[in-house]
Amino acid sequence: MKVLIGITSKNRAAILPKAITAALSQTYPDKAVAVFDDASDDNTRELVSQFNAVQWTLADKPVGYLFARNKFMRETEADVYCSLDDDSWFMSDDGLAAAMEHLRTHPSCAAIAFDILSPDRPAPTGSDSTPHTVGTFIGCGHLLRLDIVRMIGGYTPNPGYYGGEEKDLAIQLMDRGYSIDLLPGVHIWHDK
C-alpha cells in the first residue's frame, strides 16, 4: 500500500524542516511526502529548493489546514494518508512501517492514532506498548485508510470547535464498524 505523508504548514519555516526530514527518513519504501503551505508570509518558500523530493503546494491565500488535509486525501493516488503538522515529527525511522504493518494485519482498522509526545507529556505513560482500540485520534499525527475516508467524504469543514474534525471523523468511522487503533510504541513529537 502506498502512503502519502501530508504536512500542513503556516509560517513555520524554522521548524518545518524537522517534520519534512523525519517524514523523508521513514524506512517504509512506498511513500511520498507532500507539504501544503497555507500562504505563509515567512521564508517557507525558500525551503522548496532544499527539499526537492517533496511535493509542494504553495497557496496564494489562506484556506486552512482542513482544506489542505482534504485536498491531500482527495488528490493522491496513495492508499493511506498520514497526517503530520508542521510542528510534529516521527521520533524513529520505523514508525510508518510499524503503522503500515498494523493496517495490513487489521483490515477493520480505518485509522491509526500515534502516541503523541510533547513538552507537557515528554515520555509515554504506562509500560504497555500493545496496540488497542481508542475513540479518536489527534490531528498532528495519524493515519487513515483512504478508501474508507473517501466514502465518508473526508473531514467536515467546520464541525464546531478546534479539534472537533478528528472526533467527527472518528465517530463516522466507528459508526460504520471500523476501529481506530492507538499504537503506543509509535511516537510523534508535537512541539506545540
Image: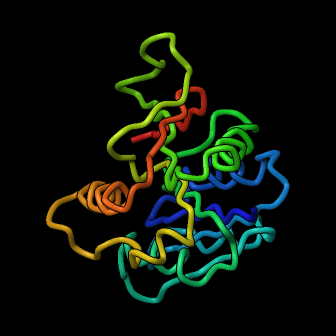
Task: Give the x, y percent position of residue 127.
Answer: 51, 10
Which quadrant holds the N terminus?
bottom right
The outermost residue toward the top is 127
Who's the residue at 44% across and 46% down the image? Answer: 180
Indicate the quadrant where residue 156 lies.
bottom left
In the image: residue 48, left or right of residue 149: right
Task: Give the x, y percent position of residue 58.
Answer: 56, 82
Its colouring scheme is rainbow
Task: Give the x, y percent position of residue 39.
Answer: 45, 79
120, 72: nearer the viewer: 72
88 versus 132 height, above or below = below
58 versus 27 height, above or below = below
75, 25: nearer the viewer: 75
113 versus 157 height, above or below = above
Who's the residue at 50% across and 48% down the image? Answer: 141
Who's the residue at 74% across and 43% down the image? Answer: 97
